[in-house]
Each structure stands twice: as C-alpha cells, then as structure tokens.
Image (spheres, rainbow, N blue to C red):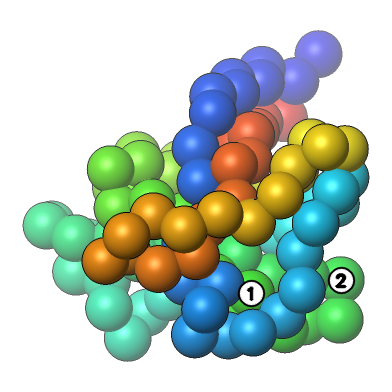
Amino acid sequence: MPITRSFSSQIRGLHVYKIKIEGSQRFSLRIDERWTDDQKEYSIQVINSLGELVGHITQEHAKMVGRWIRRWEGYVTTAPNAKRKSAGEKGLVIDCKVFLSRR
C-alpha cells in the first residue's frame, strides 16, 4: 500500500504563464533545475496535461516537495470551486492540495 501525504498549498505565478486554471484539475510536479540548489533552494514547477508550465508551488513548501519528488512522486489538484485570486506582490495564485506518495 502506498504511503501518501497531503497538505494545502498554492500554485503561484499564474499571471506570468497565463494558462487558465479554474475548478477541479490535476497537475504533475517537476523540479525546476534552473532555480534549484539541492542543499539550499528548490523551485517546483506545476505542469498541466499538455506539458505546459502553469506556475510553481509556494516557496514555503518547495524544499520539502523537491526532496520528496527526487525519490518518489507527487502531484497537485485544485478543488472544484477553486478560483484564481490576487496575492498582492506575489501575483495571481490558486489554492491547491499537494499529494506526495511512495510506492
């Protein structure tokens, strides 16, 4: 039986990538190697089913998620009623739930 952990987070950067996200969707997670230093910082890309970059997981969760998906797997989902919203200087965000699993 796989071990799964989940927690609430946000997808940020929607204003940059301009891919429409609303409602119930599932996205893959990928380490953004351009902005990742294994010892200090991680940047985690959120990828849609077409392979398009739609945003990034919040920096507060990026290190933990990055270390996890280096070895196992993870994905995010948005709730059926999720809507994009402004996060001030952080731009447009949408609430999501992160799932990390180990087989």
Q: Report if residue 80 is visible in the image.
A: yes
Position of 78 with respect to 5 (left or right) is right
Name the residue that disc number 1 marks.
54
* Disc with the residue nearer the chain's start (1 vs 2): 2
| Residue found at x 52% / y 79% | 15
Q: Residue at x 58, y 85 (%)?
A: 17
Image quadrant in which the N terminus is located: top right
Closer to us: 86 or 12: 86
The residue identified by callout 2 is 49
Q: Residue at x 85, y 48 (%)?
A: 23
Left/right placement of residue 22 relative to residue 58 reads right
Q: Secondary structure at mark 1?
A: strand
Q: Is residue 31 visible?
A: no
**Place of residue 37 in the rendered image (x, y in percent of width and height, measured from the top left):** 19, 69
Q: Label 1 sits on what residue type?
A: Val
**From the image, which quarter does the C terminus lie in?**
top right
Q: Residues within 10 Å of mark 1 (few under 14, many from 20)?
A: many
Label 2, secondary structure: give it: loop
**Marks 1/2: CA–CA distance:** 10 Å
Residue 10 image position (x, y, % from top left): 51, 46
